[in-house]
Structure formats: structure tokens, C-alpha cells
Image (cartoon, rainbow, N blue to C red):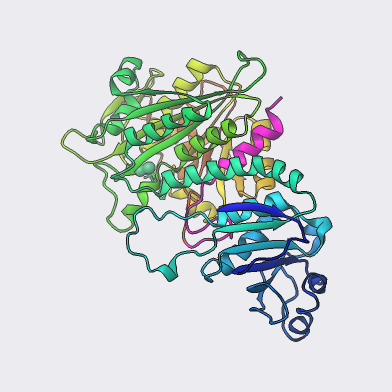
Amino acid sequence: MDIQFVTAATDIADKSALAIIVFEGAAAEADSLTGGVVGKALAQGRFTGAKGQVLDLGAPADHPAGRLLLIGAGKREAFDAVGAEHAAASAYGAVKLSGLTTLRVAFADEGAAQPDRAALGVRLAAYRFDRYRTKEPADKKPSIQKAEIVCGDIDAAKTAFATQSALADAISFARDLVSEPPNVLYPAEFARRVKGLEALGLEVEILGEAEMEKLGMGSLLGVGRGSARESQLAIMRWNGAADPAAQPIAFVGKGVCFDTGGISLKPADGMEDMKWDMGGAAAVAGLMHVLAGRKAKVNAVGILGLVENMPDGDAQRPGDVVTSMSGQTIEIINTDAEGRLVLADALWYCQERFKPKFMVDLATLTGAIIISLGNDYAGVFSNNDELADNLLAASKTEAEPLWRLPLPAAYDKQIDSMIADMKNTGGRPGGSITAALFLQRFVNGLPWAHMDIASTAWKKPSTVPTSPEGATGYGVRLLNRMVADKYEG
Ligand code: BES
Ligand code: MN
Ligand code: ZN
């Protein structure tokens, strides 16, 4: 999508749609921008400017636009940057298949305009994964190629948009990883794509199975045993702090490129969804992408545990006992509870090597989080109130919903084993909580938070105009916001 900023006086070209963002009860303000052509429609219909409303006025004969639309942005007092994104994204959604090639977005109330965020909204809404379509009919393909955002000060809008554009690039990168089919995106291919981010100034190291063997990562390696594809650990570093030796912050992602369940095989129905069981690793990679893209003043580490969970003659069995890098032993009860096994070694490695200020892990860890919170909220667990509060604050600002759940010490015995230090499942009660308690045994007392994003990594149908159905990239903007607001400078 080509994004341009223009001033109100710029003439509108042929094949352009003009979408005017209006507040509830103030839709008539759009009349001054259209020479009075909207008044009649407003007087006769139900459009009020409420959030999410779209009034398509067609192509009025006495207006130069190829299409004229009003987009409701809700109450003026409640309008914020995310509201600007959503309004512009709705405008894109309304005209993307129209055959017109340019979308111009204007704010009826210039004083409330947020042109950079409107541009971000269009970019996120226009995301599409169409690499494997070979014969889509032309009239099903989006026709809008260019967005022109009306603003008062073009240079200021461009400067503000540079940061938003870096964020959109990173979210698209994460969405692409999640959308790729599992025959294409296996652990080594994921690692190669992450290695490609060195072009942005990141340092990337990839460990293979032999290196992980030496480190004693029996927990992570056990998961990949049934797979023909080699397991990988990707270590990404962004050193943007003024002091290159400053203690880093760290993010760890579950990257199960496909989760069949292993010997504890999942049912066939819906198993294809388990290609996005690497959504946590994709979000961490996306975060590192945006930190580098906007040259964040922070030292950050991103660690991705990349494996494939398959059944095989050599696969790990229920009943096996594995030894993790921490030295703690784990009895495997269910080979489908594999994400925590991957994270156990990735978290331990992270704290031991980097001694970070804190670790945040992201994982599509449990189906139970979907039962607890539904499809909009991710869950967060933490041993540190300040870190949890910082994540929750960022979640509000960026409209990526997050809800804190407890880590009750009393539930920890649910994962005690009869023959090893622990077992990898705690039964059905509080399934997301016992998964988090398992991870807590591998953070060595460091400030840590675990985000279970099984509920939010993939959306069908779409619930917000800035996230088309499919991969959401959930977590990238939330974490980027937290870093920007709390850990830079
Ligand atoms: N990747 C799944 C969790 C998941 C389920 C993500 C549905 C997205 C949608 C995870 O590896 C898993 O299989 N978890 C099991 C744990 C159980 C065996 C203790 C689950 O949630 O059923
Ligand atoms: Mn599983
Ligand atoms: Zn899984």
C-alpha cells in the first residue's frame, strides 16, 4: 500500500474514493468538505456517526470523488489514536473491492485528525496473505493501491508515520510467519527468515540440535524427536541502548511450527490450525523487527524455541522422563503439552546467558485459555506486579486486550510427579494456570511474565477492522508500546 499525506486543498483524482471521518452527532460537519452534498442523506437516514457506521453516498454528480463515504468514529470525547486507526481501516474495508484505486481519508474535524494513525489503520487493514493463490478472479482482488491521508502539516505527519510504518512492517512480518503453511515454515526455515532480519541491524544466532544437546536441553529436544525437521533455537539481539553493556530485557517465544500432539495425537478436526502454534515466536520476532526498525534505545534479547511436534517411531512417549537444561527432570504425561517443554529450556537458557532485567514469554500454550477468556483476551501470569502492570497498561493503549490470572502456590502440587521433579500436565482444572506454574519453575526467580496467546494469535472471523481474518500479529504492538513507554532512554 502506497501511503501519501496530502492537504485538504489537494484536488482529488479520478478513481478515488473520499472517506470522511465524522463524530457522533456531528456528521453535518462533513457538509463543509463536500459542498453540501451529504445534508440530504443525513436528514433521511439513520447514520449518526456512531462508531463503526459507514454511510456510502455513491458518486454524487456534483462532487469530484468517484465515491463518497462517511465513517462514524463515535463520540468526540472518547476518540483516540486507535479510534482513528479503526475508522480509516473501516473506510478501506468499505472500498477495497470497489474497483477504485485510491482511498482518500479526511477528518471532518481537522483539530481531531490523527493522520499517522489513520495511515497505520489502512496499512494493517490492507494486510493480505495471498502467496499461494494462483487464479483469484480480478474482481475479488483488492483494487485500492494508494491511500492519501488528509492532514494539516505534511512533514509532521510523515515524521510521525515513520514509527507507525516500522510497526506495520513488523506486524506484517509476524502475520506472514503465522500464515505460512507448515510444510513451508518448519524450524530451519523460520530460523532463516529470522536470520534475514540482520539486514535491519539485529544480531541473530541459530543453534541446532548438536549445540542444544551440549547445553543439556533435553526438554526442548524431546519435543522435536519425532520430527524429520531439525529443532532450532534462534537468539536475536538488538543493542540500541546508549550503554552497549546495559542489562537487556528479554522476550521468549513458543515456536511449535506444527503441533500434531505427538504420540498423544490430536483429533483430525481442526488440526490444521496447529500451524499457528508458533504465534508466540512470531510475535517475539515481530517485536525485535520493530525495535530495530525504529532504532529503539534499549538492549533487548529475543529467544525463539523452534520445533515440530510429530508422532514417529522415535518420538517421545507418555511416561518418558527428560532432563531439562536446568537439571530438573520432567515426566511426560501428555506429549501434546509440548509448548511448556520448549519454553522450559528456552527460559532457562535466556536467564543463564543474559541475566536480563525481566523475561516475558509468549505462547499459544493452552486451549484452556480460550475457555477462560474467549477469543478477544490473552491471559497474563506474572511473579512481578510492576511487570504485569506495565503489560496491562500497554495492552490498554494499543487495544490488544489482556487479562491477568493468578499463580496460586497451592496449585503447584498439581504438577508434582511420582518419579521425577515434575510432570508436564496438571489435569483439567486450571489448565492454563498449571501450565504457567510449570514455566515458573524455569525462571530462576527472575521477574517474569507469561502471556498465553492461544486465544488471540489467530482470528476467524475478524473482530477489528485493523486485523483481517487469520493471523493477527497479537503481541507485537503491545510489547513495543511497553518497551517505548517504560524501558527506553
Ligand atoms: N498448542 C496447543 C494449545 C492450543 C490449543 C493452541 C488450541 C491453540 C488452540 C498446546 O500445545 C496443547 O496442545 N495444549 C494442551 C495441553 C494439555 C494436553 C495439558 C491443551 O490445551 O489441550
Ligand atoms: Mn500441544
Ligand atoms: Zn502446542
| Residue at the image position 72 percent from the left and 55 percent from the top | 6
Picture quadrant of residue 7: bottom right
Nearest to the observer: residue 59 or residue 382: 59
Does 168 sit left or right of 331 as displayed?
right
**Ligand 2 image-quadrant field:** top left
Does 327 sit left or right of 20 as displayed?
left
Range covered by the magenta-colored residues: 461-489
Nearest to the observer: residue 412 or residue 106: 106
- In the displayed structure, 433 sits above or below 96; it is above
Q: How many marks?
A: 0
Which residue is most to the top?
A: 245
Q: Is residue 303 magenta?
A: no
Does 255 sit left or right of 210 as displayed?
right
Where residue 100 appears, as percent x and y from the top left, is 56, 69
The C terminus lies in which quarter of the figure? top right
| Residue at the image position 35 percent from the left and 41 percent from the top | 257
- In the displayed structure, 353 sits above or below 292; it is above
Nearest to the observer: residue 286 or residue 398: 286
Which residue is most to the left?
A: 313
**Whether residue 82 is visible:** no
Where residue 204 appears, as percent x and y from the top left, is 45, 24
Where residue 238 appears, as percent x and y from the top left, is 55, 25
**Whether residue 65 is visible:** yes
Where residue 80 appears, as percent x and y from the top left, is 75, 53
| Residue at the image position 71 percent from the left and 41 percent from the top | 159
Picture quadrant of residue 244: top right
